[in-house]
Amino acid sequence: MNMGGQELRILMEMEGLVQYGFTSVLAARPGSRIVQEARTRGLQVYTLSMRGSLDPVAVARILQIIWKEKVDLVCTHGSRDGWSAGMAARILRKKTVRSRNVANPIRSHFLGRLVYTALCDLIVTTSEFIGKGMIERGIPPERIVCVPTGVDHRRFHPDVEKGLFRKDLGISGEKPLVGMISVLRGDKGPDVFLQAAELVLKVHPDAFFTLVGDGWMRGKLETALRRSPYRDNIRLTGFRKDIPFVMADLDVLVLSAKIPEGVPQTVLQAYAMKLPVIASDVGGINEVAIHGKTALLVPPNDPQALADCILTSLNDPRGMMDRAERSHRMVLEAYTLDMFLEKMTAIYGDLAVERARRRASAKTRTGAGQ
C-alpha cells in the first residue's frame, strides 16, 4: 500500500514508454499510494480489491479491464496480482511479463513455481542475484532477464539546487548530514540506521541524521526516537517527492537493508548526483555498490559496523568524492532511464510481435480450414 522502488518503477515505465508507442493502464488496490500518485500524474487507473493469491472476483474484474481496454500485454508485480492477473491473461490468451523486484526466495513447490511458469511468458528481475535465486528454485534460466531500473539523469544530477532540504530541517550547511531514503519496514533496516546514528553522535555530536520515507514501522521508530538522548540531531521526515533536493543536501546516503534485495534505485540515484553511498552487503546491492570503488559496504544488521563506516567517511571527504566520481560514471555508462526504457521496449515489443504472429497464423489456419 506504500510507495517504494517497485511502485516508482511501474509509474516510470508507464510514463516513459509512451514515447515508444506504448500506452498503459494501471490496476491496483483502492487506497494504495500508487493509485493516488498515478492519478496525480494523469495516468489511467482502475481500482480493484485483491483479497488473496487467487481471488475469483479480482480475476473477473481484470478480465473486464483487459477486454475493455484491448490490452495486448499484462505485467504483474506481486503475489496477488501475479496469480489473479496471470490467470485472467491466460484465459484471454494474452502475453504476460512477471516482474520480480524482491530477493526473498520463491516457494519451491509446484504451486509456488506455477506463477513463474504457466502464468507468465517472461520474468524480469531487477538484479542478477534475484535471477540466480529463482533458478536455484527450479525456474528455467531462459525465462529470466535482468533489467535494473534506470535513473532519470535529467532529475538526478550533481547540479540540483542545494540548501532547500537543509532549510526544511533547520540546519546549517556546515553540519554533516547523513540520510537514508526508504520505505519504513523491517527488511530495510531503518532501526539499524537509527541505532548507528546514535553511535556516531556519541563521538561526532555535530552530525545530523535524517530518515526519509513512510511505512508500517514509522510509529515504532518515532517512539524510539522520542526516548533517544540524541533526538535533536535525528529527524524523520515522512514521505517526500522532492528526492533530488533531499540528496543534493546529504553528505552521505545510507542503505541499511537487513535482507537481500535487488539493485536499489536510491543507490543509483545517489550515484547520478555524485553522492557518496554506504550500503549493506546483501543481495544484488554489490552488483553496483563495489566496496572501496563506488561505495562502502558493511555487514547487514550491524549498527556498530555501520556507525564506524559513517565516521570513516565523514573523516575522509577526499575518499568519498573519489568513489562518488566513479559511481557517477557507472550510472551514465549503464544505468540511465533511456537505457532502461529501451530494454523494456524491446522486451514488450518482442512479446507483442510474437503474439501478433501467432494470431495471424491462427487466422490463416482457420481460413484454410474453411
Image (tube, grey):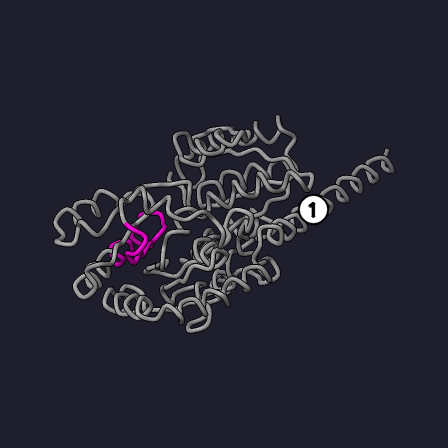
Residue 325 x %, y %: 49, 65
Residue 328 painted magenta: no
Question: Which span is picked out in magenta?
Answer: 172-193
Query: Residue at position x 40%, y 67% from top?
Result: 320
> Image height check: is 345 above or below 134?
above
Residue 215 x %, y %: 31, 43
- Residue occupied by mark 1: 349
| Residue at the bottom extreme, as displayed | 292
Query: Residue at position x 77%, y 44% from top?
Result: 357
For the question of whether residue 220 can be seen, the reply is yes
Residue 28 x %, y %: 46, 34
Query: Residue at position x 48%, y 40% from top?
Result: 81
**152 left or right of 209 in image:** right
> Image height check: is 294 above or below 167?
below
Residue 256 x %, y %: 33, 59
> Image height check: is 194 above or below 93?
below
Residue in front for this viewpoint, 152 or 82: 152
Residue in front for this viewpoint, 239 or 59: 239
Label 1, secondary structure: give it: helix
Query: Residue at position x 68%, y 51% from top?
Result: 346
